[in-house]
Amino acid sequence: MSYDVVGVLGRGGSAVVELAVDGDGRLVATKRVAVTGSAAQMHVARRRLLREAEILRRLAHPGIVPILDVVDDGADVILVFPAMRESLEDRVGRLGPLPPGEVIRIGGVLLAGLATAHRHGVVHRDIKPANVLFDEAGRPALSDFGVAVTREITGGLTPPDYAVGTPRWMAPEQARGEPAGPSSDVFSLAATLHYAATGQVPSVEPRGVVTGDLPAGLRRPLERMLDPRPERRPSAAAVLGGLEGTTVTPMLTGGSGQASVRSGVSVRPERAGALGAAAVAGRTLARVVSRLLGSPSDRPERPRRRRLAVGAALAAVVAAAGVVALVGFGPSGRPAVPPLHTVGKACAPGWYNLDGTPGCESRPDYVAGIALTQGAAVHANLVPLSATDSFTTHVKGSAGNFCWGSLRVTLTAPASTAEQLSIWKGTRKVADAVSTNGTPATATVDKPSCFGADSEDLQISVTAVAATGAASANDFTLTRNGGW
């Protein structure tokens, strides 16, 4: 398939990441790496790129950016990925430190992806905010496995005991040049989540890691993950809620032949679908909150048998009801009605409490992939407050208009909120406007030139102005008029 480049997303070292359009008109990101040097050096470079492609192809998980295609045009090797909206580094730079609940949501997805990689023997070695990307729906995923090391895939290209990665996000042992293992990735992910929550990188001191002004609910799990001694850090699966001692197993080919191993107990392939979905859902909903938010320090550790029983019971609730609502008992002995869409005292994944009353009543209604067209209004909400809703629009230009013509996009935010409309050409912002308290605001883009048709594919984003606006489950309205 051919790819038409429409913009540059980033450049570094020997690689450039470009925004492109595929043969079906979809936006994709292409990572083009110039293969230069001697014949031997070019051979090694090609092997490394193909290794990255093979790693990503085999690590199919929502928390890992997938690879769509590999193109070798003889001069360069091109890896094709879905077009992602922004990095965690960009999001924190734009919005400032993220709310604890949003950090927990991001951390849960990334831990699940990292646990999958570790389970199949892959160590990333370069986790940092710039390598956490968000798609149009705001879902995070790990990217850039170019320096990953694995026992199975084309070993020997980057020595596992060589200090690769980015120094400020490295685990201490990795910075010293010692072999990087799964616990090194856990440290780097914790440093990345620390940055998401505070806007700062944790400081590594001789006596330990100084975590700074962390929200109370994040301090305990992140400090455990940032322990200077790698043997004392929990695994990604353990932080997420998996059992200690999760076995690393090679990925088998074929869907029906893939074995699932949890704490040394094999699940037969024919039962993995039914048991795996309920178990993973139960552990994710019940334990992401208890592990990632942290448990009170005075809570005694329950016996292993009881923990398994509680997990199984919760999984059964998930399978039967689709959402978890833990039922307690009131003073009269009658079952108490649980708050809506909650797991204990926290919101169930995908639900948010915006009105301050018990229960989680709000969820996003944004649908990715919507195109804004002339005269047709689009409605969606910004839930959670840190969400970014993104749309596309096509301007069919005419050379006969010479220098005249403007595209106008108008945003009307809900009452008591402040939301920003931005219009992008590739990665360059070309116009923006802020709507406050229900007052419409219009961003205008003029015809780029006087003597061309200037047909354009533009991206439109809507984000909350967190400093002045409140969260709201009500929809904003987006309309488009004009053109050239």
Image (tube, rainbow, N blue to C red):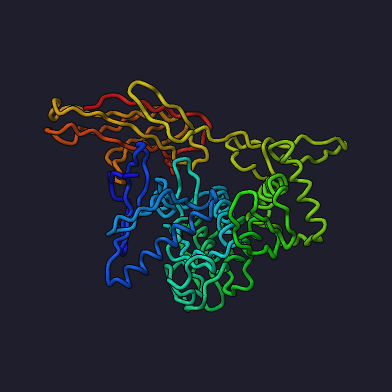
Q: Classify the position of the N terminus by image quarter.
A: top left
The residue positioned 52% from the left and 40% from the top of the image is: 384
- Return the x and y of residue 236 as percentages of the image width and height: 61, 61
Q: Is residue 96 visible to us here?
A: no
Is 47 or 204 nearer to us in this picture? 47
Query: In the visual, does 448 lie left or right of 120?
Result: left
The residue positioned 27% from the left and 72% from the top of the image is: 38
Query: In the visual, does 390 lie left or right of 320?
Result: left
The residue positioned 31% from the left and 36% from the top of the image is: 458
291 vs 376: above or below:
below
The residue positioned 42% from the left and 36% from the top of the image is: 418
Is 207 or 176 nearer to us in this picture? 176
Is 153 or 209 nearer to us in this picture? 153
41 vs 99: above or below:
below
- Return the x and y of residue 360 as percentages of the image width and height: 63, 37
Direction top: furthest residue: 375
The quadrant holding residue 478 is top left
- Return the x and y of residue 292 as percentages of the image width and height: 63, 55
Query: In the visual, does 371 lie left or right of 384?
Result: left
Q: Classify the position of the C terminus by image quarter.
A: top left
238 vs 440: above or below:
below
User: How many numbered tags mark residues here?
Assistant: 0
148 vs 96: above or below:
below
Query: In the visual, does 183 lie left or right of 159?
Result: right
Q: Is residue 22 visible to us here?
A: yes
Direction right: furthest residue: 333
